[in-house]
């Protein structure tokens, strides 16, 4: 992938073809304490592709996304979503955070979780109508969860919950889908259901960014990779950036050479 350009006015970030990147990050540094969790990271997500964010535990993958989306504050850096500040582009992004960050003590039906994805369309004081419920049901159908619409979300398995969160993201009708470890701890059927939906989104021209932990499936699932270990290690197509060298750089001694040889060239 070509390096993106910052135009002469120093503001607008575009890809070489002049297209606005769905997510362009420049010089992003994030710190929870003294040591930065993400340091001076540049990232340019390519439109219409599936990109994996990869790196060891604690590498700053979740932090990178949270700061880019304004969920946690950054020390410094710039972020553009389709060429504009994120504040004006919220409706174009659907974000599925890492699971287990929500405790569903409060009784909430699956259909209501998905309807939350439609709140922009419904409006804060607007009235839910039959067509909204139909839309939400269609999104549940896409992830194979239509029969669970009236169950309590807290009673579902982790994999089923993950599908419901994807359905909520679908309901948002976004152009950029950002998912943090959607495959972590899910069953094989759920993994298949989720990857099929993500590939269908790509076929519709949507952009998908996924924090991904399973190195064995990178080449089969993704077009591009972004390797991080606090700093950016590599960025590009799977062939360019997912290699034995870049994996050594990102993981250090945490991955055996034999493991690396199995997944990367
Ligand atoms: P990853 O998603 O790659 O596993 P994270 O972004 O979750 O990594 O974390 C990066 C670093 O920041 C880790 O050292 C982690 O312990 C630390 N960290 C993450 N969230 C917080 C937080 N809310 N408060 C303090 N430190 C945090
Ligand atoms: Mg994480």
Image (cartoon, rainbow, N blue to C red):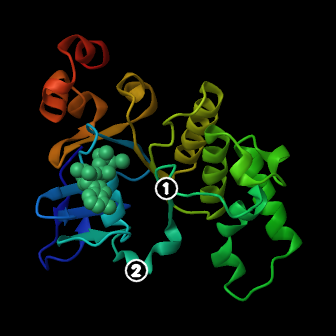
Q: Nearer the viewer, residue 72 or 91?
A: 72
In the picture, residue 246 is in which quadrant? top left
Q: Nearer the viewer, residue 23 or 109?
A: 109
Q: Which mark is residue 123?
A: none
Q: Residue at x 19, y 77 (%)?
A: 11
Please, is residue 34 above or below residue 59 in the view?
below
- Horizontal relation, residue 164 to residue 263: left or right: right
In this rendering, the label closer to the viewer, 1 or 2? 1
Q: Residue at x 31, y 18 (%)?
A: 263
Please, is residue 259 above or below residue 232 in the view?
above
Please, is residue 101 above or below residue 181 in the view?
below
- Horizontal relation, residue 149 to residue 159: left or right: right
Of mark 1 and mark 2, the one earlier in the sequence is 2
User: Which residue position is annotated with label 2?
Assistant: 87
Please, is residue 56 above or below residue 121 in the view?
above
Q: Residue at x 85, y 44 (%)?
A: 147
In the picture, residue 55 is in which quadrant? top left
User: In x, y percent, where is residue 218?
Assistant: 38, 29
Q: Which mark is residue 101?
A: 1
């Amino acid at each position: 992938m070509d390096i993106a350009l910052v135009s002469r006015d120093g503001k607008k970030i575009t890809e070489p073809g002049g297209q606005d990147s769905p997510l362009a990050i420049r010089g992003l540094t994030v710190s929870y304490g003294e040591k930065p969790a993400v340091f001076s990271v540049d990232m340019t997500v390519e439109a219409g592709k599936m990109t994996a964010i990869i790196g060891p535990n604690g590498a700053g993958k979740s932090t990178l996304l949270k700061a880019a989306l304004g969920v946690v504050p950054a020390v410094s850096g710039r972020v553009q979503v389709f060429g504009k500040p994120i504040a004006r582009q919220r409706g174009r992004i659907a974000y599925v955070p890492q699971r287990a960050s929500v405790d569903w003590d409060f009784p909430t039906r699956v259909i209501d979780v998905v309807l939350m994805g439609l709140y922009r369309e419904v409006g804060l004081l607007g009235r839910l109508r039959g067509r909204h419920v139909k839309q939400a049901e269609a999104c549940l159908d896409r992830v194979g969860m239509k029969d669970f619409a009236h169950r309590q979300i807290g009673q579902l398995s982790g994999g089923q919950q993950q599908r419901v969160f994807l359905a909520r993201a679908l309901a948002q009708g976004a152009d950029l889908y950002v998912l943090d470890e959607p495959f972590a701890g899910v069953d094989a059927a759920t993994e298949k259901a989720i990857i099929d939906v993500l590939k269908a989104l790509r076929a519709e021209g949507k952009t998908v960014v996924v924090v991904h932990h399973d190195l064995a499936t990178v080449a089969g699932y993704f077009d591009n990779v972004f390797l991080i270990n606090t700093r950016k290690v590599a960025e590009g197509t799977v062939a360019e950036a997912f290699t034995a060298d870049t994996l050594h750089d990102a993981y250090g001694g945490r991955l055996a050479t034999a493991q690396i040889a199995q997944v990367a060239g």
